[in-house]
Image (cartoon, rainbow, N blue to C red):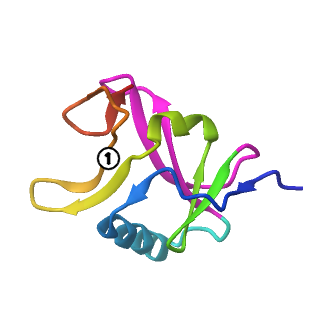
């Protein structure tokens, strides 16, 4: 029996169209296993103390699940404190390619943009 909480509320993070396009492309190119969803979270480490987690994963017993324009998103509710209001973007420029995180909760970020403190 699953205790996964599917919320009708809006996802605590926003994705730009570029990020959604890349996520959908990753799902189709990488052959993400049926049942896995995009996990967004934080983990200890990085230059500034915390780093972002963005991966495809199985739902855990305490996860909240959101539907963001057809993309299943998982988040541990404890991470919402650090991620609420964040925007995730994907850039394809010559000098910067990859996901970038614009987090209004970050009091300090490192130069790479994947580590922060709150």
Q: Which class describes the residues within 10 Å of circle 1: few (<14), some (14-19), or many (20+)?
A: some
- Residue 14 sits in which quadrant? bottom left
In the picture shown, does residue 51 fall above or below 16?
above
- Please identify the residue farthest to the right as the structure is shown: 1
Relative to 29, is 92 on the left or the right?
left
In the picture shown, does residue 34 fall above or below 45?
below
Q: Residue at x 31, y 39 (%)?
A: 114
Residue 65, given in percent of the width and then of the height, sits at: 64, 57
Residue 101, given in percent of the width and then of the height, sits at: 32, 47
Q: Residue at x 50, y 50 (%)?
A: 12
Relative to 66, is 86 on the left or the right?
left
Residue 43 magenta-highlighted: yes
Residue 45 or 109: which is nearer the viewer?
109
| Quadrant for the C terminus in the image | top left
State which region is magenta.
36-62
Residue 10 magenta-highlighted: no
- Please identify the residue farthest to the bottom as the structure is shown: 28
Residue 74, given in percent of the width and then of the height, sits at: 60, 53
Q: What residue did someone put label 1 on?
A: 101
Q: Residue at x 63, y 62 (%)?
A: 36
């Amino acid at each position: 029996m699953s205790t996964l909480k599917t919320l009708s509320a809006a996802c605590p993070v926003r994705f730009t169209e570029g990020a959604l396009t890349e996520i959908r492309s990753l799902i189709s190119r990488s052959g993400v296993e049926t049942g896995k969803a995009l996990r967004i979270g934080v983990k200890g480490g990085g230059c500034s103390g915390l780093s972002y987690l963005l991966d495809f994963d199985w739902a855990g017993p305490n996860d909240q699940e959101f539907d963001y324009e057809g993309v299943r998103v998982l988040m541990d509710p404890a991470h919402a404190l650090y991620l609420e209001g964040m925007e995730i973007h994907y850039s394809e420029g010559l000098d910067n390619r990859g996901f970038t995180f614009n987090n209004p909760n970050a009091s300090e970020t490192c130069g790479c943009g994947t580590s922060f403190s709150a």
